Amino acid sequence: MDDLDRTILGLLGADARMSVATLARRLKVARSTIQARLERLESSGVIAGYTVKLGEAARQSRIRATVLLTIEPRAQANVLSRLKSLPSVERIHTTSGRVDLLLQVAATSTTTLDEVLDQIGEMTGVKSSESLIHLSTKLDRAV
């Protein structure tokens, strides 16, 4: 990946609906160059898809929390399987450090969030959990 590829990704990260023609004009390169770059980025897995990034207005009806989990040895596969079955669990990351898994959870109310957190905490294999409720987003550069 070179600077042109990174610039294309940056522009698409800001507006995934940007046309190939607009990208070409902004970057002052041929449309066919942009098309070929996009096809290569897609086929190599750098671009996995194009999506909508929800704004704050859409997020206001959702309460989000980061959940830090410590798992019993050899229980991770079982815990992961059960976590994946919970619709409120949006993301699961493995980590290095004092916790084993970092989850992003979303719910429509504090009552629902509390129920989901209870379900997670009661899972066999979960040694401990810590929940951090997201209050506001000050910066989001995620692509």
Image (cartoon, rainbow, N blue to C red):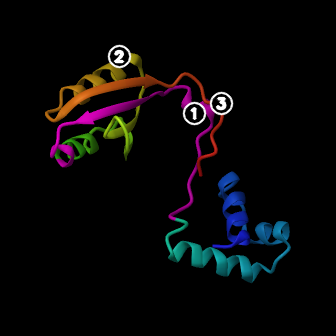
Secondary structure state at the residue bearing disc 1: helix
Magenta residue check for 135: no
In percent of the image, x 55 and y 22: which residue is there? 135
Q: Could you tell me if residue 17 is visible in this image?
A: no
Q: Which residue is mark 1?
A: 58
Residue 114, given in percent of the width and then of the height, sits at 32, 19
The N terminus sits in image quarter: bottom right
- Relative to 79, 51 lies left or right: right
Residue 117, given in percent of the width and then of the height, sits at 30, 25
Q: Which residue is mark 2?
A: 111
User: Residue 138, labelled with which disc?
Assistant: 3
**Residue 68, picture quadrant:** top left
Q: Is residue 27 above or below residue 62?
A: below
The amino acid sitting under disc 3 is Lys
Which numbered disc flags the more N-terminal residue, 3 or 2?
A: 2
**Residue 10, picture quadrant:** bottom right
Residue 90, given in percent of the width and then of the height, sits at 40, 41
- Relative to 141, 115 lies left or right: left
Give how far apart the Cα atoms at labels 3 and 1 are: 16 Å
Foreground: 57 or 72? Answer: 72
Give how far apart the Cα atoms at labels 1 and 2 are: 20 Å
The amino acid sitting under disc 2 is Thr
Secondary structure state at the residue bearing disc 3: loop
Which numbered disc flags the more N-terminal residue, 3 or 1?
A: 1
Give how far apart the Cα atoms at labels 3 and 2 are: 25 Å
Q: Which residues are magenta?
A: 48-77
- Relative to 30, 129 lies left or right: left
Residue 129, given in percent of the width and then of the height, sits at 30, 27
In percent of the image, x 52 and y 62: which residue is there? 49
Which numbered disc flags the more N-terminal residue, 1 or 2?
A: 1
The amino acid sitting under disc 1 is Ala
